Image (spheres, coloured by chain):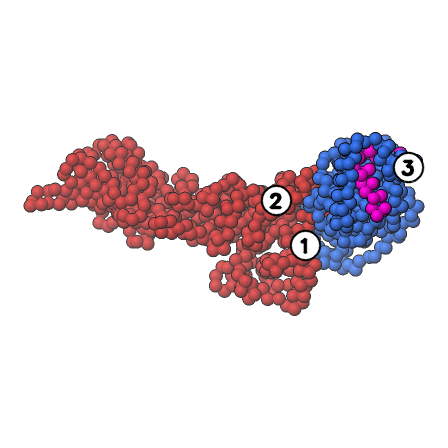
Amino acid sequence: MGEEVFIIDWIQLNLTGRYRAIKELFSRGLSTEEIISFLGLEKEKLLALRKRAEQEYKRSLDLGIDLIPISSDEYPILLKNISDPPALLYVLGEKVWLKDNFISVVGTRRPTRYGINATRIIVSRLVENGIGIVSGFAYGIDTVAHTEALHGGGYTIGVLGTGIDVVYPKVNRGLRKDILESKRGCLISEFPIGDKPESWHFPRRNRIISGLTQITLVVEASLKSGAMITAGYALEQGREVFAVPGNIDSENSQGTNQLIKEGAKIITSGDDILEEFNVIPKLTTIRLPELNEEEAIIWNILNEPRLEDDILNISGFDVSRFNIIITRLELKGLIERLPGRMLKRKDG
Amino acid sequence: MPFSWKGIPIGMLAKVLSATLLGIEGALVDVEVDISNGLPSFTIVGLPDQAVQESRERIRSAIKNSEFNFPVKRITVNLAPADIKKEGPAFDLPIAIGILMASECIVSQLDSSFLIVGELSLDGSIRPVNGIISMAIMSRELGIPIMFVPYENSSEAALIPGVKVYGIRHLTEIVQFLNGNISLSPAGPAKSIRINEVSGDFSEIKGQESAKRALEIAACGFHNIIMVGPPGSGKTMLAQRLPTILPPLTEEEALEVTKIYSSAGLLPKGGGIIEERPFRSPHHSISLAGMVGGTSNPRPGEISLAHNGVLFLDEFPEFRRDVLEALRQPMEDGTLVISRAHGSIRFPARFMLVASMNPCPCGYLGDTKKPCTCSPYQIERYFSKISGPILDRIDIQIEVPRLETDTLIKSNLGETSESIRMRIKKAREFQSYRFKDGFRANGLMEPREIKEHCKLTPSVQGLLREIIDKFHLSARSYDKLLKVARTIADLSESELIREEDVLEAIQYRVLDRKYWEKKFS
């Protein structure tokens, strides 16, 4: 019973939204009742909040949502240290932050091919070496990062800008299911259950993304993107910002290049990040696939993702033969197809 | 000839043969003119439409201005059979001749029957009409040896052997000829004419080797094809050149095409025979009637104008749903039947469908330079605009990327259309030899025929099973894959479908694999 009242107190505190004050008071060792009274809210408002908090608690039980107050040992330590941590986290899935090191990976919602590839390359390397991925569950780079982490068998945390039970963006329903079913990831949110995606939610939840980890990696971002806001929070919180460089004529790389100019570490491979974690990178197992002569020619040309027509030109095969070889390589699972008639080697 | 009652002449009757169009076929019409005493009047009966009704005024003026007398009597014109709707101005001339015969201005010196069509202008000169070639074909079938047609249509009618065609410029000319005062020489057949604005040659397209190969296979097996690619990747250029690698029209096909264009009034001035395969690319705002033809007076639509040629639908998902759905039946049967209260009309419509679409609404999904601004949901919705049954009738699906300039510069000049066409011709001969009963293309095979013609050795069957597992193909795409593999085998004149054929065919089924719909994974 006492436990229940205690949690409801915290829900009530979270609903006030006065994170800074709550953290300040809590760190001085005050009890929840004391904090509530210190906040000096009007009596009617307090009552209304109390009522909502009680409902919120009931719904969380129904939906199987974990509630983690800032007082809990399970509350992410790094997040506790920022100036305005949520008083309470809503969590669905495994509490994976307790298990591993994490890094935040953020970027534009409208990535180029380059951004997608860069994310895949870096994330898969990190995951392979036991680093989990925090991201914002939006589409674009976020989705690539989460998906790649799961594919690589790693941990991932999605920080939502909506109530924990809201599926947003809708097309990510598959990803949401994958994360929850994999037992290797979770979704977290500071917003009350059922909260709709409001535009002001997203910049705010970005402070949680950067706050959860020591390092925030920006893959692709235009100057005005949400990823830049996240990078700004990271610096404010005294965390490190890394960035992937890009073409100077690409709008999506202007943000990242700007960060680099301002001193962000340049990241060109997963190993650049592993260094920071003092992880000695696993040797990439170079398993040379069994190829016949023709297949080897194509395989060697594919040292980077390339346009099919270019490979065709370089290899000198006729189209018919070329297509046959490509299908063979695909059947062997060695290469894969990207939109726009691109081919690339399948990693790993 | 004069009628008489108790020796007093009371009226005159004349009969002239003419023709009208039913869809694209000619139909015989008897024009009967009766002149009798009574209050002066001029009536036309026999289901005439507005244009035929108005011909009274044209006829009256034309006769007067050609310095003949327009009889001030009671004139009744009957167009028989009375149950076919008569349309258009083509009856002007036969009615005028009928009147002049009934009033004995003309006493025909010809000893055989003849057929007349033509529109009059007020000064008596004669204007061209639509569908002459269909009427000439009808005349030959009915054994009518002589045709009088407007001068500008004469070479078109003369394409049909066995009918003597006189091209007429003016009303007085035909009157004098019939009276035996002057002689005319019959028209000679027309030269061939062009209908396509652009034709070009495959050698002009640099790069895009895969797309060209896919078009070659499509042309060879009469497979419908869809091209997916961003704006500016050359989809239209590729499609426009497809007719140049299709085998030339046979004589019979050329006549069919000319018939359709003639009846739609689309033959260029002077007429002639169409010897190139049509290429039609209607805009995506086209109406249902524009696409399939019809409304109350049936006219060939775009699908019939593309008969024996290529129907190119750019921005495929942007077409109206009902317009796309209406393509299904003709794609299966090669004809379109329009039913009307007065009976049904058949339009030939055996075309090769070439569709093109963007990979996403903004067009830049997969582009190396520009980011795609579409949300995955928008992309999902864009693809769902094409219904399954339509997609089911498209055997070949390819992606056409936008090439970078340096790729284009590095590429060699391509093969010419003519040399591709030679290969296709050989492969088609091989196909028709295999089908035994004349030309049946692989793309038109039915499930039963697929079983018969696409026999597989056990090892190829094993490979196919592996492919289906690996690429998650449906049972439907299995059949398509076989058909395309069959055509590839035909191109190298192989009786059996070999492993390579199947391996290549899978590269022309990109939509099945949906790899770009999963945008970020």
Foreground mark, 3 or 2, reads 3
| Residue B382 numbered tag | 2
Question: Can you give x and y, in whole percent of width and height, for residue A170 in the image?
Answer: 69, 45
User: As rendered, which of B469 and A71 lies closer to the eye?
Assistant: A71
Where is residue B287 drawn, in percent x and y? Answer: 48, 42
Is disc 3 placed on a helix, strand or loop? loop
Label located before the other in sequence (3 or 1): 3
Whether residue A22 is visible here, answered yes or no, is no
Which one is closest to the eye, mark 3 or mark 1?
Answer: 3
Magenta stretch: includes residue A60: no
Q: Viewed as shown, does residue B428 lie left or right of A140?
A: left
- For label 1, the crowd category at 10 Å Cα-Cα, with few meaning under 14, some 14 to 19 and many 20 or more, is many
Residue at left 67%, top 63%?
B465
Q: Which colour represents chain A?
A: blue
Q: Secondary structure at mark 1?
A: helix
Residue B515: horizontal and vertical position, in percent? 68, 50
Q: Which mark is residue A30?
A: 3
Q: Are marks 3 and 2 on the same chain?
A: no
Q: Main secondary structure of the magenta part?
A: helix
Residue B463 in sight in this render: yes
Task: Write down which chain is painted red.
Answer: B
Query: CA separation, marks 3 and 2?
Result: 57 Å
The circle drawn on residue A323 is 1
